[in-house]
Image (cartoon, helix red, strand yellow):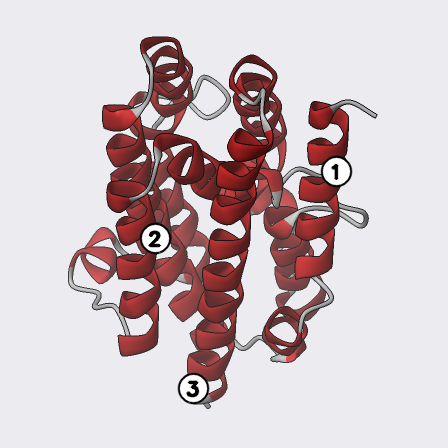
Amino acid sequence: MSIISELTMTLDKMVNDQFESLEFRNFFAVPLTMERGRFYMIQNALYTANRRDCWGYVQGSAPLEVKRVIWQHESDELVNDPRANMDHYTLGVKQGEVLGLKPEDFEKAELPAMVRACFYAWHHIAIRSHWLTAYTASHMLERRNNGQIVKGGGMSFRVGKKFENELGISLKKMISLDVHAVADTEHSDNISVMFERYVKTPEDRALVLQGARDCMAIDRAYRGALGYYMEQIK
């Protein structure tokens, strides 16, 4: 088995295992109310903004060819996604209208302490790590959202179905979750192509796996934090 084939299998297993973790199971077990749904929508938009920070940091340290791939990815996320005719942060704010949220609700929102810590941790990896580690760490969140890799659907799809099943809001009305369920499949595939170009040695593989492990640990902490805070909303 080639180093890339083995690496692909390992990364795929890691994103599937996320959904079996204690933190993910606890997050999905919290019943949605309208207020909990509003909290989640606001926090998800702030998460989208954090992703823009991290991909920007990764782009700065990556080789030129990789910068181009990230630029193409971020043109959807930060400038305009033709699937939605808006950038993804604006898309998240627009989605909030379905739950009665207004743009100012997002503008004045604060990060809860545990969520803030997770965002700082993702920043740290993106800024301080070898570019392959940083690149993988950001990529894994796209991969974890790829329904062609994750059995049962990626995060956006599953959260969208949770809103549909528990609050009666159609997935098609949850426009940000619906777009991400499609967009991140393409983003994940495009970004992972760079592993074939740059992972040649066991040392390269180790850098990739370090980023994957670190990111998935923070991702579990983040979902655990969201679940905890949602439980506090009655």
The residue to which callout 1 is attached is 149
Identify the image quadrant of residue 100: bottom left
Q: Residue furthest front?
A: 202
Residue at mark 1 to residue at mark 2: CA–CA distance: 23 Å
Residue 41, image x and y in percent? 42, 59
206 to the left or right of 107: right
The residue to which callout 2 is attached is 122
Asked if disc 3 and disc 2 are in contact, CB closer than 8 Å, the reply is no
15 to the left or right of 132: right
Q: Look at label 1 and name its amino acid.
A: Ile
Identify the disc placed on residue 233. Answer: 3
Q: Is residue 149 above or below residue 187?
A: below
Q: Secondary structure at mark 1?
A: loop
Q: Look at label 2 and name its amino acid.
A: Trp
Residue at mark 3 to residue at mark 2: CA–CA distance: 26 Å
Q: Look at label 3 and name its amino acid.
A: Ile
Within-10-Å neighbours for mark 3: few <14, some 14–19, many 20+: few
Q: Secondary structure at mark 3?
A: loop
From the viewer's side, name the closer residue of 151 and 200: 200
User: In the rendered view of the protein, which quadrant contains the N terminus?
Assistant: top right
Q: Is residue 226 above or below residue 132?
A: below
Q: Secondary structure at mark 2?
A: helix
Report the residue at 55% width, 13% height from top.
Answer: 197
| Of callouts 1 and 3, the N-terminal one | 1
